[in-house]
Amino acid sequence: MPAARKKPSATKRRTTVLVATRKGAWLLHGDAARKTWKIDGPHFLGHVISHLVLDPRDGRTLLAAAKTGHLGPTVFRSTDRGRTWKEAAQPPAFAKAADGDGRSVDHTFWLTPGPASEPDVWYAGTSPQGLFRSIDGGVNWKPYSNINDDPQFRAWMGTAQDGTPDGPKLHSVIVDPRDARHLYIGMSGGGVHESADGGRTWKTLIKGLDVVEGFGFDPLQPTFHDPHCIRMCPSNPDRLYQQNHCGIYRLDRPSDTWVRIGRSMPKSVGDIGFPLVVHPRDDNRAWVFPMDGSGVWPRTSPGGKPAAYGTKNGGRTWQRLDAGLPKSQAWWTVKRQAMCADNAESPALYFGTTSGELWMGRDGGRRWNCIARHLPEIYAVETAEL
Amino acid sequence: MKVLIPSALRSYTQSSRAEARGATLGELLADLDRQYEGIRFRMVDEQDRIRRHIRIFVNGTQVTDLALPLAHSDEVIIAQALSGG
């Protein structure tokens, strides 16, 4: 029997961390052991970059969701791993309203490459909430009017005043790798929604999710739901995890009822936060980065003592992961897109802070090292194999 | 006609000045977009509203109406307003 041939491209691949910030984007290229990092940037200095994502289907196309303080939003696209960039010909934009009172996209917030079966498809979520799709690799974007202009969805979205401090968002656009027509989206606010027909029709997926207590809010109404970050397990697309405004949840399909797994977090820390990361190959493993959601919602690490928490059993128990992180007086936090894992045999975690530090947690966060500091406020962190 | 371009938009024009044609302000911005693809959407949103931090002056007077008639001799200044830190 002949020896299996090695794939040279696979052995040469290195981890690159894609960092999107309030003032531009940086790429950190790791060595084979991910011990030293070569920083490349800034790209788009002065632009607010909400998300920077590599297309895993071709390994070379990057999309960056951008705007500046003065200018409207756009999407930049590179087909040579970030060496050169070209602007989208038609960035995400809502349909023009006949009465002139329609919405305008403030910024594209979330980018999701389509499945392997649709090589040029991308999805984008915007602020205010809107869903867009490109079928040409991110050059031209078309709106989903059945969400963006639908009276029921618009009522669930609320107004800009109902959203997060830098605007309400549509995020967590997830495509089922087994079925390109099966989509999930999250809206802050507006709940979780699922489509089985490529986005033609949608149904809400909020059963089991709590809403803020004490105000008489009806948990059956999507408008009262704020999913912060939803992730599908790559190793088991029937399992989703969610970090919500009101706790950490897991959903095992075909059930449509979320289970609050954050109840087993330490009471002194709670289960409020923004990012959630799933293991690339083990659907029982996930990580969160709790924040202080008490009182006026400081959105800082609880007590100024930052830590990730990881579970190895689907959320039954959680382990505090703070080795190497500051032990006190660290008041930064981690935004919903600013934490991820790489694809190594023992995956490392990465997170970017609101104070511009990039941290790496080897072996699933067992030991943290700061690999870049003095960056602008970090909005999103993704890893890629280049 | 002559159009002064703010620094935030010079990645499109590569210059502080551009020449563009149009019988109205809207037509002038469309002509700029033909020459410098994508520049209009950075200044004007999808509802045809001039963006919050963009100011346009015609012969020194601030204007907001894209239907405003223009003459060939008019000078158009596009400026970036303060937008925070």
Image (cartoon, coloured by chain):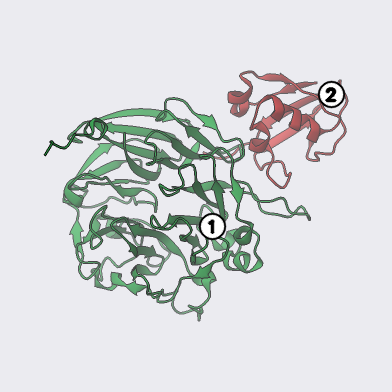
Chain colours: A green, B red
For the residue carrying disc 1, how many other residues have a C-alpha within 10 Å: few (<14), some (14-19), or many (20+)?
many
For disc 1, the marked residue is A168
Q: Residue at x 26, y 43 (%)?
A: A359
Where residue A107 sits: x, y (%)? 55, 46
Whether B16 is drawn above or below A8: the answer is above
Residue A243 falls in image quadrant: bottom left
Q: Dot 2: few (<14), some (14–19), or many (≥20) neighbours within 10 Å?
A: few
Q: Where does residue B6 sit, x and y in percent of width and height?
A: 64, 26
Tell which subunit mark 2 falls on: B
Q: Residue at x 51, y 64 (%)?
A: A189
Q: Quadrant of residue B31?
A: top right
Numbered badge on residue A269: none
Helix, strand or loop status at disc 1: loop
Q: Which residue is mark 2?
A: B74
**Circle 1 marks a residue in which chain?**
A
Tell me which amino acid carries mark 1. Pro
Instruction: State left or right for residue A176 relative to residue A16.
Output: right
Q: Which residue extends farthest front?
A: A1
Give SS at disc 2: loop
Quarter of the image with the C terminus of chain A in it:
top left
Residue at mark 2 shares a chain with residue at mark 1: no
The residue shown at (74%, 33%) is: B56
Cα–Cα span, label 2 and label 1: 41 Å
The image quadrant where one finds the N terminus of chain A is top left
Look at the picture and state if A375 lies above or below A178: above
Amino acid beneath label 2? Asp
